[in-house]
Amino acid sequence: MGQRMTRRQVDEGLELYAGKNYDAAIKKWTISLQKMKDNRLRFSTLGYLAAASRDRGRNKDYLVYAVQQIDIAHEIDDNNLRAQAYLTLSRANEMLADYFKAVSYSRSAVQYSSPGESVQGYALLVMADSYIGLCNFSKVLECLDKALIISHEKEDRLMEIHVMSTMGKVYLALKDFTKALAFQRRAHELSLSYANSTVDQNADLSSKFVRLTKLKLATPMRLMGDYESATRSVEEAMRAATSVGDRPVQAKCLVCIGDIQRSQNNNEVACKKYEAAIPMLQDMNDRYSYTLAMIGLVKASLTLNTPKQTVTDILATALSTALAMGNKLMQARCHLLNESIYLSDNRMEEARQAHETAERLFQEADLVCSVCQKPMGMQSDHIQILTCTHIFHQRCITDLLQKWARQAQSCPKCHRNVLYSRSYIALVCI
C-alpha cells in the first residue's frame, strides 16, 4: 500500500468519524496503521484511535494507543509529541482510576511542553481530577488555579468549562450542593455558548461537553430535592448520548436515573437502572462510576427484601474497589453503610467501629474543620474555601468572612492573611 493511499485511508476514517460511523472509522485507521511508515502520521493516527476508543468507552485500548504514541515520540526525539503522548497517557490512567500514575504522567506532559501551552492546562486538569480521586483537595485547587489562568491566557473555553465543572465536582464531594450546582450551571452555560459559536470541526467536541455538563447538573439538583429538574436534565443528556452512541455518558446517565428513582423511594426501578449500568461500567473499566453504582445499589437494596448477605457482598465489592483506587471518601461512605447494616442487626460494637473508621478516613483526607473539629463531607453542609486552599464549614468562619472586606483576617489553620491569593479559583464568584 502506497503512503498516499495510507493518508487517504486516514482521511476517510476522519470522515467516517465525523459522520458518527465510529466503528468503521476505527477499523479504517487500524488497517492503515499496518503499513504506515511515516512516524508522525502514525502518531496522529494513534491519537485518533485513542480519542475514538475513549469516546466509545474502550479505556484499555485508549491506554494501549497512548503507550504506542510514547514510543514514537521517544524514537523521533520530539518534546512536543512527548507532551501530547504523556497527556493522553495520563488521561487514560485517570479514566482507569490509576490516579498516582495519572498524576505522574501529567507532570511529564507539563515538563515536556512549553510554559503556558494548552497541553499544560489540560495536564493540570487531569491532575485535578486525579487528586479528587485521591481526596487531596488542596492539590485539586492548586491545579485548577493554574489551569484557569492558562484557559484565560489562551482563550480556551473548553478548558474553562472543564475547570468550572471540576470545581463543581469538588463541592459535590464535600456535600455543598448549592455551590456544586452553581459551578455546574456555569460550566453548562459556557458549553452551550461554545457550541453555538464553534466551527464545524469542533462540533462533536462541543456537543460532548453540552451533554456531559447537562448530566452533571442532575446530581446536585437531585440532592437538593428538585427531582423534576434533575430527571429532565439527565433524560436530555441520555437522549443526546444515545443519538451518537456515547456509551460512557449513557452508563453514567443510568446511574444518575437510579439515584433519582431511589431518592423518590422507587427502589425497584432504581435497582434495575444500577444493574443495567454496572456491566457497562465494568466493560469500560470505569472503576469510579462502577463504585458509585454499587453504593447506590446497596442503598436501594436495603429498602427491599434483598437477602442481607447479598447486600453485604455488593458493599464489600464496592469497598474493595474504593480501596484499590485509594479513594478515602468512597471508603468512608462504604463504612457508613456498613454502620447502618450493623445497627439494623443490633450489632452495636461493629457499628461503632465502622463509624470510627469512617471518621478516621475523613481525617486522613484532611476533611475535618479545624474550627469545630467535625468532619466535612459526611452530611449536607455549606463549605467555604479560603485563598490559602484550606476548607472550613461556612458557619465556622462567618465572622472572618464578614470582616474580610474591612480589615486583614487570617486563616484559622495556617494563619496566613486571607487576602494572600494563592488560590484564584477560591475567589471566583458565581
Image (cartoon, grey):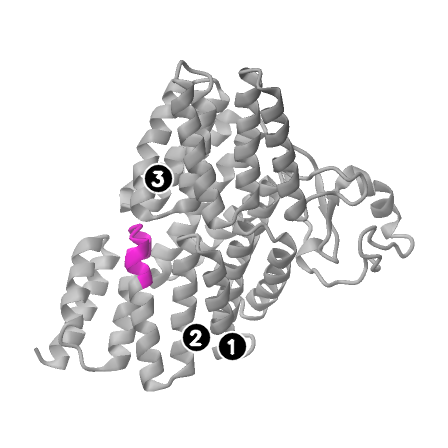
Residue 126 lies, with reference to residue 310, above or below; the image says below
Percent coordinates x, y for residue 33 in the rendering: 18, 71
Q: Does the magenta segment cover residue 90?
A: no
Reply above or below: 127 against 350.
Answer: below
Element carrying mark 3: helix
Q: Do residues under tags 2 and 1 come within 8 Å of each other at their CB atoms?
A: yes
Q: Quadrant of the N terminus?
A: bottom left
- SS class, disc 1: helix
**Mark 2 highlights which residue?**
83
Image mark for residue 111: 1
The residue shown at (35%, 39%) is: 251
Disc nearer the start of the sequence (2/3): 2
Residue 160 in view (yes/no): yes
Residue 28's spot in the image, x, y percent? 15, 63
Secondary structure mostly seen in the magenta stretch = helix
Please give left or right for residue 337 compared with residue 139 in the image: left
Residue reaching furthest to the left:
1
Question: Mark number for residue 369?
Answer: none
Residue 211 is drawn in which quadrant? top left
In the figure, is residue 206 to the left or right of 12? right
| Residue in the image at 29% along x and 45% along y | 283
Task: Please state which amino acid type lies under the numbered disc 3.
Answer: Ala
Name the N-terminal-most of marks 2 and 1: 2
Q: Earlier in the sequence, mark 3 or mark 1?
A: 1
Name the outermost residue toward the top. Answer: 305
Image height of 313 relative to 211, above or below: above
Q: Badge 3 is on which residue?
A: 251
Q: CA distance from mark 2 to mark 1?
A: 8 Å
* 142 w.r.t. 196: above or below: below
Which span is picked out in magenta?
Answer: 51-63
